[in-house]
Image: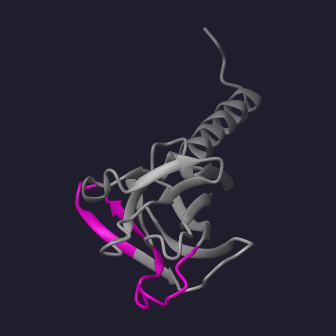
Amino acid sequence: MLQQTPVIKFAFASLVAIGLSLATQQAKAAQISYSGSNCTPTNASVGFVDYNAYGVMSLGDPATFQSAQVSCPLPVPYTAGGVPGNLTSVTVAFFDRNDGFFQPNKDFSCTIYYQNSAGTPFTGATATKNWFSLPTPTTMTVTGHSNVVGATMICDLPAPEGGNLSHLLNYLVTTS
C-alpha cells in the first residue's frame, strides 16, 4: 500500500489543480483569414454570384440592380472544457464598385447571425460601408459576440454598375 507522504499529497493536489486549470482554460486567441470564395449565395441570390481570383463577386441583376447576398461560415472557438469561446470580430476586405449613381442606397453590408447554446438564433452586429473602392480594397469590421455555439455572416454585395463588379475578397476572423 502506498503511504501518503506530504510529497505525494502535494503531487496529487498539483495534478488536480492542473487538470482543473486545463478544463476551464480560455480558448486561445487567434486570427484566421478566409477567402471570399468560402461564401456561398443565399437561395435568393443563386445565379447572381460568381468566383474568381479575388473571391466572390456580385453579378447582380443589371436591369433591376438587385444586390447579391452571400453566406460566409464563421468558426466558433471552444475551450478545452467544451465551453464556447468568443468570436471577437470579423474584418471584411472588399471592392464596392457601386458608384451610387443608379443605386444610391445600395451599400456593401455584412451582418453576423448567431446561435446560443439553447439553440436560439439571434442577430448580431451589422457593418455597412458606402465607398466606391477602386483600385484598392476597403475594409470594415463587424463586432463579434461571446459564448455562441454557431455563427454565420450574411453579406450584401451591390449589383454591377457601369460594368464594375463588387467583390468580397476575404474576411479575417478574430477569436479568443
The relative height of residue 81 versus residue 69 in the rendered view (above or below) is above
Q: Is residue 175 visible?
A: no
Placement of the N terminus among the 4 image quadrants: top right
Placement of the C terminus among the 4 image quadrants: bottom right
Residue 119 lies in magenta, yes or no?
Answer: yes
Give the camera-side residue of 100 and 37.
Answer: 100
Q: Which residues are magenta?
A: 96-124
Taking the spot 24% from the left edge, 54% from the top edge, the residue there is 119
Taking the spot 45% from the left edge, 43% from the top edge, the residue there is 82
Give the camera-side residue of 93 and 85.
Answer: 93
Q: Quadrant of residue 105?
A: bottom left
Q: Is residue 144 visible?
A: yes
Give the camera-side residue of 117 and 170.
Answer: 170
Residue 64 lies in magenta, yes or no?
Answer: no
Give the camera-side residue of 55 and 5.
Answer: 55
**Residue 111 percent location from the top left of the image:** 41, 71
Taking the spot 47% from the left edge, 70% from the top edge, the residue there is 160
The relative height of residue 155 versus residue 49 in the rendered view (above or below) is below
Q: Quadrant of residue 67?
A: bottom left
**Residue 59 percent location from the top left of the image:** 44, 60
The number of numbered discs placed on residues in the rendered structure image is 0
**Residue 24 percent location from the top left of the image:** 54, 49
**Residue 8 percent location from the top left of the image:** 71, 26
Q: Quadrant of residue 64?
A: bottom left
Residue 65 is left or right of residue 127, and the answer is left
Residue lying at the far top in this picture: please name it.
1
Q: How is the image coloured?
A: one colour
The relative height of residue 52 versus residue 130 in the rendered view (above or below) is above
Taking the spot 61% from the left edge, 46% from the top edge, the residue there is 21
